[in-house]
Image (cartoon, rainbow, N blue to C red):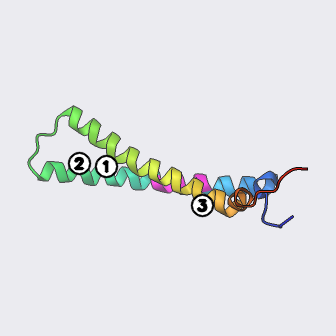
Amino acid sequence: MDDRRNRLSDPDYAAFAWGRYRRVMRWMLLFAAAAIVVALLYLKLSGAPLTLHLMIATAAGVGGTVLLGTALMGLVFLSSGSGHDADAATHEEEP
């Protein structure tokens, strides 16, 4: 068995990998907050009336999009780096 396969089964590597994933998500939470502020500033400067509903919808839409994209891409890199993609690509029939 390849050394890279099933690394998330190793508790030490799993803790490292998930810690890295959470660290990336924390940084991207800050980036999402900054993107929300920039979007709201853009709307304010464009002359649009900033109602409470518009601000909530903008914050949810921009923040949700940034965080969802980050979460999915982070999971792709976690899966690839842990060897799970290689396991899925090599199908071995059981006897």
Residue drawn at x 79%, y 56% as measured from the top left: 12
Compare residues 49 and 91 and report the one nearer the observer.
91
Q: Quadrant of residue 86?
A: bottom right
Q: Residue furthest left?
A: 47
Disc 3 element? helix
Foreground: 37 or 88? 88
**Crowd around label 1: few <14 · some 14–19 · many ≥20 (10 Å):** many
Would residue 63 appear left or right of 83 to someone viewing this image? left
First along the sequence among labels 3 and 1: 1
Q: Which mark is residue 77?
A: 3
Residue stretch rendered in magenta on the structure: 21-28
Can you give x and y, in whole percent of width and height, for residue 88 in the image?
Answer: 71, 56
* Residue at the image position 11 percent from the left and 40 percent from the top: 49
Q: Secondary structure at mark 2?
A: helix
* Tag of residue 40: 2
Is residue 43 toward the left or the right of residue 6 in the image?
left
Q: Secondary structure at mark 1?
A: helix
Residue depicted at 34% across the width and 40% down the height: 60
The residue under label 1 is 36
